[in-house]
Image (tube, rainbow, N blue to C red):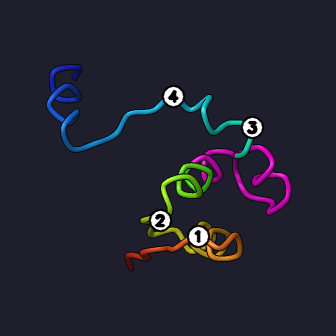
Amino acid sequence: MFKALEKLRDVVIFEPLEKYLESAIKIAINKIITVYDALYIAQAKEIGKLLTSDEKQRKTAKELGIDVVFIE
């Protein structure tokens, strides 16, 4: 498995969740969503865009002014 992840280093950015945890907890509490979903939104706030197929996550990100690409 680690060999497969190693091959993704040129394509995927791996970041520690702690970098976004405080922001994610605030989002989760304020928007009543899971911390898991809020972590993606917190990261998207910094990066500037969210790719998701989750409607609640899309709605929350839009409310926070994040550009969202929604996949149906």
User: Residue 32: within the magenta?
Assistant: yes
In this view, 60 is above or below 22:
below
Give whichever of discs 4 and 3 has the lower sequence position. Answer: 4
Q: Residue at x 52, y 68 (%)?
A: 54
Q: Nearer the viewer, residue 2 or 8?
A: 8
Q: Which residue is mark 3?
A: 22
What type is the residue that disc 3 sits on?
Glu
Alpha-carbon neighbours of circle 4 within 10 Å: few (<14), some, or many (≥20)? Answer: few
Cα distance in 3D space between marks 4 and 2: 18 Å
Look at label 4 and name its amino acid. Pro
Q: CA distance from mark 1 to mark 4?
A: 21 Å
Mark closer to the chain start, 1 or 4:
4
Give residue 16's mark. Answer: 4
Residue range of the region highlighted in magenta in the rendering: 24-39
Amino acid type for the residue under numbered disc 1: Ile
Residue at coordinates 38% horizontally, 75% vertically from top-left? 71
- Residue 49 numbered tag: 2
Mark 3: secondary structure: helix
Labelled disc at residue 66: 1
Specify the label residue 39 is tagged with.
none
Q: Quadrant of the N terminus?
A: top left
Question: Residue 42's x, y, as percent?
Answer: 62, 51
| Residue at the image position 76 percent from the left and 52 percent from the top | 28
Amino acid type assigned to the residue bearing label 2 in the image: Lys
